[in-house]
Image (tube, rainbow, N blue to C red):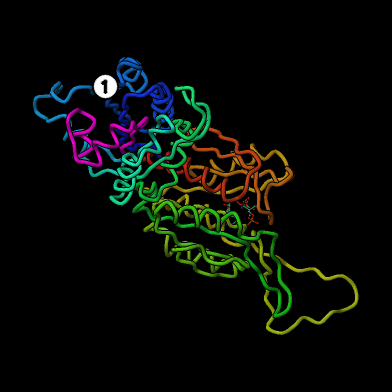
Amino acid sequence: MLKDQNVVLGVSGGIAAYKACALTSKLTQQGANVKVIMTKNATEFVSPLTFQALSRNPVYTDTFDEKDPAKIAHIDLADWASIFIIAPTTANMIGKLANGIGDDMLSTTLLATEAPVYIATAMNVHMYNHPAVQENMIKLDKWGYKFIEPGSGYLACGYVGKGRLEEPETIIDVISNDSNISPLLKGKKVLISAGPTIESIDPVRFFTNHSSGKMGFALASEASRLGADVTLVAGPVHLSTPNGVNRIDITTAEEMYQEMMVHFQQADIVIKAAAVADYRPATVYDQKMKKDEGNLSIEMERTKDIIKELGERKQNQFLVGFAAESSNAITYGQKKLTEKNLDAIVINDITTDGAGFGGDTNVVTYLNSKGDKSSLPLSSKTEIAKQLLQFIRSDFEDELK
Ligand code: PMT
């Protein structure tokens, strides 16, 4: 979620400034661009050089230290930020912000920014509970500032209570899950296929497979949550349509083929999680077939290989296939990736417990055309969908560069 986001991290003067170092490191590991502003008091606790090394950017400590004469640094930083975090935030900084005081680099930049601001507080428990501080926080809350409440425990001042700066991982989680952050797939058109197909023999009988549609629906739901415009071509399944998703119900492989072809051209990302029939009865009887003595042979013919055709037609689309394999999963998956001209493939080894058809969990390996391989351990299909979309989005962006 934080990849490519421009994060300004404001560090004010408290002992918890040391935790802001870990936060800087974790933000950059997530692919965020981080620029740090320190108050003068913060520099008493940690050296600006530490933040410079961790963020790989100059650190701002003085409003009048204009590094580029063509720009006014605090306005430039305020405009650059897509996310603003203050960690730790002291009672003093809360007071300044709540009263419109801009008397140093951090407070002036805060007044000038339009980015969402996250305030991770850290102070002595009595300071935190002081009516002035509480009132200032209520005021800021009403103005739309987001608070990351301090945790409880042993405080550096010797007290035990509420006041500890939240752990960097928690701060990142809170921000990543905030819908105010410009969603990763905003403006992208994502086409997903899910579920089985049904190939009839007569009005009573048909061939199908065990796909429940859960994996594809989880992807559709998550892609929509990430801001994508999602079209979901769904085989016959008993699942409700995820919020905001345009669902097209189909029954046969041929119908899926037709719908995928209609929507493919406009798509940015195409994910084929469906389990499509490779064969269908060569003859479909209008009337119920009567049973007879002896065995019955049914001639089957090949359906169209939808993804193969998409692989031949693709221009800028990022095309992701799935492979459900019961032996040599990686080898077969790799073969499909190459033969069908895919950009990535998600391989489920259906012999692994909790993987594949029907259940709420999966275990998969994501393999891209550059040869990067990531294994996702047993997790819910929702969690797997989240992770897969991170990989897909990142590889898709790389291909556009
Ligand atoms: O639906 P669930 O119960 O949640 O289960 C999820 C799943 C196991 C169905 C899903 O994770 C999965 O692996 N889907 C692909 C299943 C499969 O059998 O793939 P395949 O190896 O037959 O096909 C490879 C790829 O080609 C797939 O992307 C498939 O959609 C596509 N294909 C296959 C045949 C065909 N005629 N046209 C296609 O486009």
Callout 1: helix, strand or loop? Answer: loop
Is the C-beta of the residue carrying label 1 under 8 Å from the nearest atom of ligand 1?
no
Q: Which of the two residues, 259 or 244, is positioned nearer the viewer here?
A: 244
Region in magenta: 84-111
Q: Is residue 38 left or right of residue 232?
A: left
Name the spot of residue 281 as percent of width and height, x first: 69, 69
Name the spot of residue 241 as percent of width and height, x first: 52, 66
Residue most extreme to the left: 70
Q: Give the amino acid at mark 1.
A: Val
Q: Is residue 390 visible?
A: yes
Compared with residue 78, is residue 21 higher up or lower down, i.e. above or below?
A: above
Q: Is residue 398 visible?
A: no
Name the spot of residue 271 as percent of width and height, x first: 50, 52
- State which quarter of the image contains the C terminus: top left
Determine if the magenta segment contains residue 94.
yes
Determine if the magenta segment contains residue 5.
no
For image coordinates 62% across by 65% down, the residue present is: 197
Name the spot of residue 382 as percent of width and height, x first: 57, 50
For image coordinates 65% across by 47% down, the residue present is: 362
Marker count (numbered): 1
Residue most extreme to the bottom: 287
Per the image, the residue denoted by label 1 is: 59
Compared with residue 384, is residue 266 higher up or lower down, i.e. above or below?
A: below
Compared with residue 50, is residue 247 higher up or lower down, i.e. above or below?
A: below
Q: Local crowd at mark 1 within 10 Å, few (<14), some, or many (≥20)?
A: many
Q: Is residue 16 left or right of residue 142?
A: right
Residue most extreme to the right: 293
